[in-house]
Image (cartoon, rainbow, N blue to C red):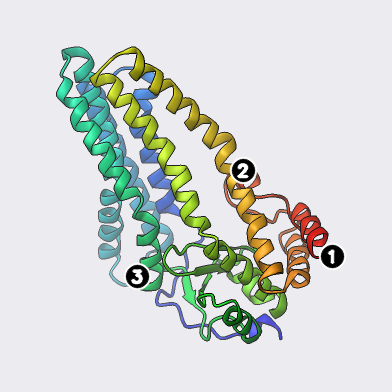
């Protein structure tokens, strides 16, 4: 069956957004908030005021760009204000970084030990909140608040549904992401408490049903293996260990605290360069194994991977750093053929 005949629920937002302006603006304001601390090496009240002003200017520029590119004639003022208000909420982490940097400056000059203790507590609060982000994203998708996503009516194809029931796994929720005409074939799994699979519109509309079922089975394998949760833990914990050790060393400078600071920071570097990419690559192989071993669709998975190479013009992964976190398509095909003949 051709993918073009599959039905989808209509998108509540009639206008797609191929340029991720908000993500670009958010990245810029985080970079600006870190710039004085990293590049200049010291902080002052004047530098802090300039930092905050720069963050505000970036969001204003983003709101203007969003207004010019995407705003429809209906209620333009409201959409401008909505974007800017959303930006101000997202700017809170950057403002906290800037304020924290200023507090560190005051601590180094005046020796206020209580500041580091307060920041130590705040850091761990943010760690707890960061663990909630995947759950929030999942809830936003299920509630229909992701504007470029459309829920697939009917769920997975019938043959895949039968195989999912056979292995007693939960049936995934399927969504299609509109990329505004870009020919990118990819899929991802974002659910923590329930399997939520997102695929690009180009993949959904052009891949054969048997191959698409194998791709969906692969993403379901990520959920069964709890790969999203493992990635969240292995990425977040080293970052906050490094931050906490730094704050603790400020509160109590000693040989032990400095040794812990060095150990956790070395571990953070190793985690970002080696451990996290290795874990992600292993998770891809494990998800392929789930397709072959549990669903009995190894042959369909091989054909799907071969189709991905063609559909993506031999650039199967389009995400940043994906070459470090995903094995090559050719390698995955070789492993499947070796293990499942």
Q: Does residue 235 lie above or below 263 as drawn? A: below
Q: Does residue 63 lie above or below 73 as drawn? A: above
Name the residue beneath numbered marker 1: 341
Total labels drawn: 3
Q: In the picture provided, is 16 more to the left or to the right than 118?
A: right
Q: Quadrant of residue 91?
A: top left
Q: Residue at x 43, y 28 (%)?
A: 264
Residue 158 spot, x, y in % from top left? 62, 86
User: Which sits in the foreground, 96 or 160?
Assistant: 160
Which mark is first along the chain, 3 or 1? 3
Name the secondary structure under disc 1: loop
Name the residue beneath numbered marker 3: 73
- Rendered image: mark on residue 8: none
Q: Residue at x 35, y 46 (%)?
A: 61
User: Which sits in the foreground, 149 or 139?
Assistant: 139
User: Which sits in the foreground, 51 or 245?
Assistant: 245
């Amino acid at each position: 069956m051709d993918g073009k005949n599959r039905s989808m629920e209509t998108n509540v937002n009639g206008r797609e957004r191929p340029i991720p302006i908000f993500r670009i603006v958010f990245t810029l304001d985080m970079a600006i908030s870190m710039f004085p601390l990293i590049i200049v090496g010291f902080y002052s009240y004047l530098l802090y005021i300039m930092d905050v002003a720069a963050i505000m200017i970036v969001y204003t520029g983003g709101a203007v760009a969003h207004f010019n590119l995407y705003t429809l004639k209906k209620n333009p003022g409201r959409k401008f204000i909505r974007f800017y208000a959303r930006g101000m909420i997202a700017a809170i982490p950057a403002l906290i970084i800037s304020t924290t940097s200023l507090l560190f400056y005051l601590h180094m000059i005046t020796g206020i030990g209580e500041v580091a203790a307060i920041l130590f507590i705040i850091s761990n609060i943010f760690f707890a909140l960061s663990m909630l982000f995947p759950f929030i994203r999942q809830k936003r998708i299920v509630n229909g608040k992701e504007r470029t996503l459309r829920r697939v009516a009917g769920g997975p194809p019938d043959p895949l549904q039968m195989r999912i029931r056979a292995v007693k796994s939960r049936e995934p929720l399927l969504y299609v992401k509109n990329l505004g005409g870009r020919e990118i074939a990819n899929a991802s799994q974002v659910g923590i408490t329930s399997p939520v699979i997102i695929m690009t519109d180009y993949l959904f509309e052009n891949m054969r049903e048997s191959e698409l079922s194998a791709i969906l089975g692969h993403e379901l394998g990520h959920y069964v293996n709890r790969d999203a949760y493992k990635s969240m833990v292995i990425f977040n914990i080293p970052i906050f260990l490094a931050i906490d050790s730094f704050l603790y060393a400020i509160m109590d400078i000693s040989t032990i605290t400095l040794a812990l600071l060095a150990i956790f920071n070395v571990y953070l570097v190793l985690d970002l360069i080696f451990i996290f990419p290795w874990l992600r690559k292993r998770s891809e192989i494990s998800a392929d194994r789930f397709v072959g071993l549990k669903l009995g669709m190894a042959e369909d998975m091989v054909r799907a991977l071969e189709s991905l190479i063609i559909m993506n013009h031999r650039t199967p992964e389009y995400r940043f750093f994906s070459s470090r976190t995903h094995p090559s398509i050719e390698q995955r095909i070789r492993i499947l053929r070796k293990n499942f003949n």
